[in-house]
Image: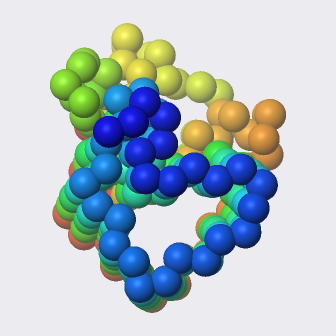
Amino acid sequence: ESEDSAALYMDSGELEITDSIIKQNQSQAAFAGIMFYNSNVVISQSKFSDNRGFFGGAITGLLSNVEIYDSSFSDHNTYVGGGILSIGSDWIIARSTFSDNYASAHATGETNCDDGIDNDSDGTTDMFDDDCTIGNGGAIAEMSYLSTYFGPSSYQIVNSTFSGNTAERWGGA
C-alpha cells in the first residue's frame, strides 16, 4: 500500500511490460497501479486486476505514449478512471479487454464521485459540480480540462472489448 503509486512510477523513461500480472495494489492518495510521466511504454500480454486508489486503477499516463496489446484490465475501483486515466497522453489499445472496472464516489471509503471513457471536450472542469469530485470513467477516463496545461489525449482503440464497467457519474464504458 502506498500514498502515491502503488506498483510502479516512471518519470521520463522507456519501459516494456510483457507477460506480467499487476494486481491487488492500493494507493491511498494517488495512482493505484502504475503511473507514467513523459515516458514511452509498451505493454503486451499482461493482466491488471483488483487495483484500488484515487486515480487510474491500472494505469495513469501523463504526457506519455502508451501502447497496449493483448492485455486485460478487470475489477479496478477508483474515483476517476477505473482502468485507465489519461492526461495529455497518446494511446494505442489493441485486442484488449476492460471488464468490471468501477469509478465511484466511494472507491476508498470516502464520499466523492469516475468510470468508462469520459472526455470533457468543452475544456471545462466539472470535478466540483454538486460537491462531487469523482466517479467518471469506469474503463477509461480523460481529464481533458487539464488539456490547457498538458494538451489533449488521443486514442486508437482496435478490436477491444468493454463489458461490465460502471461509473457513478459519466462514462461507464
Q: Is residue 159 visible?
A: yes
For the C terminus, which image quadrant?
Answer: bottom left
Q: Horizontal placement of 36 versus 118: left or right?
A: right
Q: Is residue 86 visible?
A: no
- Colour logic: rainbow
Q: Position of residue 62 (x, y in %)?
A: 67, 48
Q: Horizontal placement of 20 versus 156: left or right?
A: left
Q: Position of residue 9 (x, y in %)?
A: 57, 50
Vertical relation: 93 (above or below) 29: below
Quadrant of residue 146 in the image?
top right
Count of marks, rendered view: 0
Q: Position of residue 42 (x, y in %)?
A: 61, 77
x 73%, y 69%: residue: 14
x 19%, y 25%: residue: 109
User: Which of 19 and 114 lies nearest the eye of the viewer?
Assistant: 19
Vertical relation: 61 (above or below) 122: below
Vertical relation: 70 (above or below) 83: below
User: Which of 5 and 61 lies nearest the eye of the viewer?
Assistant: 5
x 25%, y 34%: residue: 107
For the N terminus, which image quadrant?
Answer: top left
Residue that protrudes farthest toward the top in the picture:
131
x 39%, y 36%: residue: 2
Q: Horizontal placement of 56 versus 161: left or right?
A: right
Q: Position of residue 154 (x, y in %)?
A: 68, 62
Vertical relation: 172 (above or below) 18: above
